[in-house]
Amino acid sequence: MNGSANEPSINMAPLDLKKRLLYILHLGFTEVRDLALAAGNQQIADLADAMEILPAFVDRCTEDDLEMIRFVLKNYQDKYHSAFDYPARFDRYETPERF
């Protein structure tokens, strides 16, 4: 996390990181369900691709892993302009207590 002008930097404690990743997964699967109902097949596949790497980082995550997570979430966001805005939820917003 280098904190460049385009990328806010926040320090994440391991439990906060775990909570954020799980929340992102929750939102992703919520969107998958919504897309499946609307039959947006390519976007469903792309969202699944973006979400599938996240569980690997829940218990152990390096700085390089954080950059990979940001890259994957940003690519999905840039392509589909999701209302869930996963990159912002990962780096900028507080994670709700309940989701």
Image (tube, helix red, strand yellow):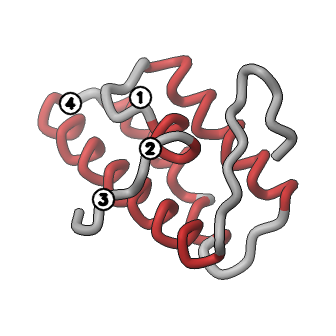
* Residue wearing tag 1: 42
Circle 3 — which element? loop
Nearer-N-terminus badge (4/3)? 4
The kind of residue on which mark 3 rests is: Pro
The kind of residue on which mark 1 rests is: Gln
- Mark nearest the camera among 4 and 3 is 3
* Residue wearing tag 2: 93
Nearer-N-terminus badge (3/1)? 1
Query: Which residue is found at the position 31% from the left and 26% from the top?
Result: 83
Q: Position of residue 69 (x, y in %)?
A: 67, 49
The kind of residue on which mark 2 rests is: Tyr
The kind of residue on which mark 4 rests is: Ala
* Residue wearing tag 4: 39
Tell me if 57 is positioned left or right of 94 in this view. right
User: Distance between the Cα atoms at labels 4 and 2?
Assistant: 30 Å
46 in relation to 80, above or below? below
User: Distance between the Cα atoms at labels 4 and 1?
Assistant: 9 Å
Question: Are the residues tagged 4 and 2 within 8 Å (C-beta)?
Answer: no
Question: Are the residues tagged 4 and 1 within 8 Å (C-beta)?
Answer: no
Q: Residue furthest bottom?
A: 59
* Residue wearing tag 3: 96
Q: Residue furthest left?
A: 37
